[in-house]
Amino acid sequence: MKSSKPLCRASLGLLLGSLLATQGVSAAQPLDARASDPAALGLMQGFPPAAEQQVNFRNYLQFPRTRWSFSHIRELVPTVAVARGSVQVSALPRELRTDIDGLSIQVADGSSMTWEQSLAANYTDGIVVLHRGRIVYERYFGALQAERPHTAFSITKSFVGTLAAMLVEEGVLDDRAQVSHYVPELKTSAFGNATVRQVMDMTTGIRYSENYADPKAEVWEYGMAGHLMPRPAGYQGATSFYGFLQKVRPEGEHGQAFAYKTVNSDVLGWVVQRASGQSFTALLQERIWGKLGAEQDAYLMVDEVGTAFAGGGLNSSLRDMARFGEMMRNDGRFNGQQIVSSAVIADIRRGADPALFAKAGYKTLPGWSYRNMWWVAHDDHGVFAARGIYGQALYIDPKAEMVIARFASNPIAANGANDPVSLPAYAALARHLMGQ
Amino acid sequence: MKSSKPLCRASLGLLLGSLLATQGVSAAQPLDARASDPAALGLMQGFPPAAEQQVNFRNYLQFPRTRWSFSHIRELVPTVAVARGSVQVSALPRELRTDIDGLSIQVADGSSMTWEQSLAANYTDGIVVLHRGRIVYERYFGALQAERPHTAFSITKSFVGTLAAMLVEEGVLDDRAQVSHYVPELKTSAFGNATVRQVMDMTTGIRYSENYADPKAEVWEYGMAGHLMPRPAGYQGATSFYGFLQKVRPEGEHGQAFAYKTVNSDVLGWVVQRASGQSFTALLQERIWGKLGAEQDAYLMVDEVGTAFAGGGLNSSLRDMARFGEMMRNDGRFNGQQIVSSAVIADIRRGADPALFAKAGYKTLPGWSYRNMWWVAHDDHGVFAARGIYGQALYIDPKAEMVIARFASNPIAANGANDPVSLPAYAALARHLMGQ
């Protein structure tokens, strides 16, 4: 921990051990998708559930409890609604295809599996595939159901990035200005002299590790600051997201390399709120969610002072996430209206500089870049994606006219655990839908 | 505190002082409705709000912060959705009347005020009046809006009581059986040898004080058990609703007197869950909420093991609460279907024994009784009501064909603070709508 007021390290070590522990299995061999099904485990069954089957604030980030908790976040922490509004639900015609489950996928290690097997391999909780705006595939597993919001984790970032890009295009936000112009409280932090654009594309030079395998990584204090996880006795760290952000120190120079650090998204959320005079929640609702004809309200996790977690707090139903993806695929037009301008979509799809991205060393994402908090493939299909830890994905393939929305609860907190199977599967399905 | 493991009393005293304190005003003279408007006070304005304008888990039960928090409960504590489902919104035709605000009300102390003044006198956050199924009056104040759920507090009890009465009529639940038949864990508590009926009508003889003015009242440990409020350092009391219920000791005999004690509702919730095999949340959603054609999802506060607070955890929009009331007024029929059987409604409306009720000494409710967790007036209009602390009310006047749904945040936690104004106002409006 880099906090100037260090945590009680003994307590923290115990706490992290408890937060990260998998139950009754070794870390190397977690239960598989079927064995970790919450119903099979009896999680949260009974009135009340037996002690060993309870999922609560202290254990909800432990696999396999995640297989239940990721579909029940609001039952564990405070949240704010992102209302669907009083509009009609928008049509998502269904033309389910039966030729997808058996599709053969060659995954990154050279072995083969079927599409259906790939879902289990990645602990998929649910998946919706749109082709030309129609649902061609939809499955739910474990605790997830069509109506139930699931955590989208860092897919949230692409919402705040899109809103920021909209405000930039409208002239409400200047992406060349320094962060401290909008948020004077960040002046002495590492973000103070970064430009809004560097934050939007995550090329800030800051000291912040998001390595979940490292108990000293700053991501842990950040989670405790936002009260996404319990604080150890004697905790003296920040007690809000914005409190933490003000303490982040520089490391390296801004603008030199892409470095994926969640705190950038919350800085952007802060900037966007100050520039617009509206909360992230209100902006998301008014500008996007309330226009989609969503089936369900979405919601955001909030910290103890009511700040929504722009870095990863969104929860939504899968079909509604697919609606958002379909809007992005259609150059911002959906449900009879232009929701995001085509110029903003084009700016996202053009991506950023892959040379800056390459410095981050993502083996599974060669040639990609990160722009407006979207992952951009720079491939011949024009693929771009929103991605979240534990396997959340909104994958948009314009050439194949395909949108995949997927929620998951992979035991391993790294996209490297999903990409070797997921990315070949998505690409194979795209080719299949194109008749190739 | 009657707990066998007493709390640290010094900490508890400090905590309760903090929970109960009004801010910057004397307890005798709280800010009035206009001065305590959350917008006037700047509560939760800004990104982030200034420290003195923050509403958080530690202070949300303090007036005037309640004027914001009661419309934002889910942003402060974990909650579970009670889904409206995928049904069409049911029609609530609007025929707003302009002759209500000026209506003269003679309140209990003999003085007069207009209807509109009566709303401010009672810190009304919102009110919807239906006459013959049409909205004739609808107002929102402070933080409440038409789409926003507000805490219903003990109105929740009438939902669990109605569901229990439905299960009794269906033969799923035997109201003559002892509580311990359904919940063996309660066998050694005061509830063990009470009948389900005694719980449903709150005539159990138990040691539990709900006097919010008394820092030693058991209601405080109950709130901490359910984590509705912070626990002091060294807290050793119960950590779940059901954990607390098992510790409740007898006081007096069952069946001898009505005594309003919230724990009965949670015992009934437990019984209902065990008898039906469904959670209170699922039952409420399947049997009632999902059939009303509600505009919004409702939600329930949950404790740390996921148990919904049957005694007071419901939050809903006001129009949806009015829909529920209209269903009750129409002998259980609403939105094109029989939602609750007419026999159950008749059983509620017949009430219980007013002689047992009289022993509780409610000066504002002469001749009333309490049946299936509904308050029954036994008057010539057939009035029956669901009531919640701080002024929540669902008031049904069958003779006047009137339903009033009202949410409020009165500084004083007692219906004695609302009834002297509210009950005469409701009765006057009923006569007015009847053309008298």
Image (cartoon, coloured by chain):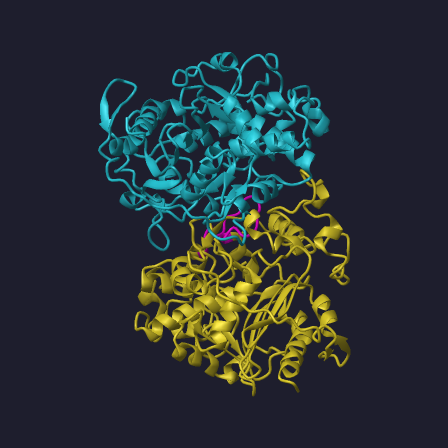
Chain colours: A cyan, B yellow
Number of numbered discs: 0
Q: Is residue A227 above or below residue B66?
A: above
**Residue depicted at 62% across the width and 16% down the height:** A250
Quadrant assignment for the N terminus of chain B = bottom right
- Whether residue A80 is visible, yes or no, is no
Q: Position of residue A278 (x, y in %)?
A: 66, 41
Segment tinted magenta in the rendering:
B225-241
Q: Nearer the viewer, residue A161 or B144?
A: A161
Which corner quadrant of the image does residue A240 belong to?
top right
Q: Nearer the viewer, residue B159 or A341?
A: A341
- Whether residue A428 is visible, yes or no, is yes
Q: Nearer the viewer, residue A394 or B289?
A: A394
- Taking A153 as reference, is B55 left or right? right
**Residue depicted at 60% across the width and 14% down the height:** A255
- Taking A106 as reference, is B222 left or right? right
Q: Is residue B235 above or below residue A421?
A: below
User: In the rendered structure, does residue A135 fall within the stretch colored magenta?
Assistant: no
Q: Position of residue B115 (x, y in %)?
A: 71, 73
Q: Position of residue A357 (x, y in %)?
A: 49, 15
- Taking A54 as reference, is B426 left or right? right
